[in-house]
Amino acid sequence: MRTNHRKAAMLLLASFALLGCGNGTTSTATSCGGQTVDGISIPSASESSSVAEICKAGKLLAGSVVGFPEVVQDPTTQEWLGSAVDVGKIAADLMHVKFEVVPTGYDTFIAGMQADKFVMTAAALFATPARAQVVSFVPYSSAGTCYATLDPNIKTVDDINNSNVSLLTYTGTGSEEVMLKKFTKSKIVSIVMPAGGQLAGIAQLQASRVTVASFDSPTALVLASKYPNLRILPGGASECIKSPDLSTPIAVAYRKGDDKFGAFLTAVVAKNKDRLLNDDVKYADPKFFS
């Protein structure tokens, strides 16, 4: 009996040992931080306050807002898609946590992060000097600004900087920040980005409420196709996409001072550069534009 008990105990210990190895491997593969996955180093909770918060919640919260084509929503499922969103999704996958978008606005991104509503942004944010004073950035793309007008006297970007010209901008956006410095003579008409996105700006233009409407360069071909009567500057839709005005890095933002988390996001972007570039092409489909 003792022999049988001893054999049974040994088998049980062996089983626990095997399970322990399995659990150890699984723990390494599924733990939230403090490991290297696919060549990317994920900081531990003690090294990064953002990682600590993510691991505790079991999800990565990212502030986002539609910004074609870096952030779009599937017209059928309303799923958040695009290169900016994929940066967050990939980071969450590596940490083995859920990814969740916190809808916000361009005018409330910084306040939302400072209020701990999310640990990063997954949006088409221009990495401007003013924003860089309060948050840190990881660029994943670049774009600039184009302008649409119906005024036959406005033929170049320089013509916009005139006291007789009213220029539509969007409150709190990075593009507005740099336009305010450039177009010092223009009458700036600043509105909060509405649910209809930049199409609402074109509606303002066609209703003669403004002389010029600004918009992000990736949308130039879509707008030119949808509104062929518009003059798009600089140089037409195709030229604007190639050489936009006020070209600026587009980035995800994270809390200032959390350098380890920033290095992690930088590695995510570098490792997935081709995927993110392909996203911008894929989601430039007009069906995603709003």
Image (cartoon, rainbow, N blue to C red):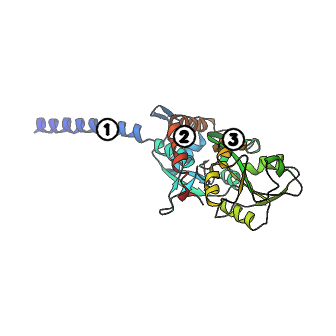
Q: Residue furthest top?
A: 39
Looking at this view, is 133 or 152 the one in front? Answer: 152
Disc 2 is placed on an element classified as: loop
Q: Residue furthest bottom?
A: 207
Mark 1: few, some, or many residues within 10 Å (few <14, many ≥20)? few
Which numbered dot is residue 123?
none
The quadrant the N terminus occupies is top left
Q: What type is the residue that disc 3 sits on? A: Ser
The residue drawn where x is 41% and y is 42% is: 30
Q: Are marks 3 and 1 in contact (CB under 8 Å)?
A: no
Camera-nearest label, 3 or 1: 3
Looking at this view, is 129 or 273 the one in front? Answer: 273
Q: What type is the residue that disc 1 sits on? A: Gly
Which circle's residue, 3 or 1, is located before the other in the chain? Answer: 1
User: Spatial distance from mark 3 to mark 1, Cα to Cα?
Assistant: 54 Å
- The residue under label 2 is 45
Q: Are marks 2 and 3 in contact (CB under 8 Å)?
A: no
**Residue 3, horizontal then vertical, whole percent:** 11, 35
The residue drawn where x is 47% and y is 41% is: 94
- The residue under label 3 is 243
The quadrant the C terminus occupies is bottom right
**Residue 138, horizontal then vertical, whole percent:** 63, 39
Which numbered dot is residue 22?
1
Q: What type is the residue that disc 2 sits on? A: Ala
User: Spatial distance from mark 2 to mark 3, Cα to Cα?
Assistant: 42 Å
Camera-nearest label, 2 or 3: 3
Mark 2: few, some, or many residues within 10 Å (few <14, many ≥20)? some
Residue 18 versus residue 201 in the image, above or below:
above
Left or right relative to 63: residue 20: left
**Residue 198, horizontal then vertical, whole percent:** 67, 59
Left or right relative to 255: residue 18: left
Residue 77 versus residue 109 in the image, above or below:
below
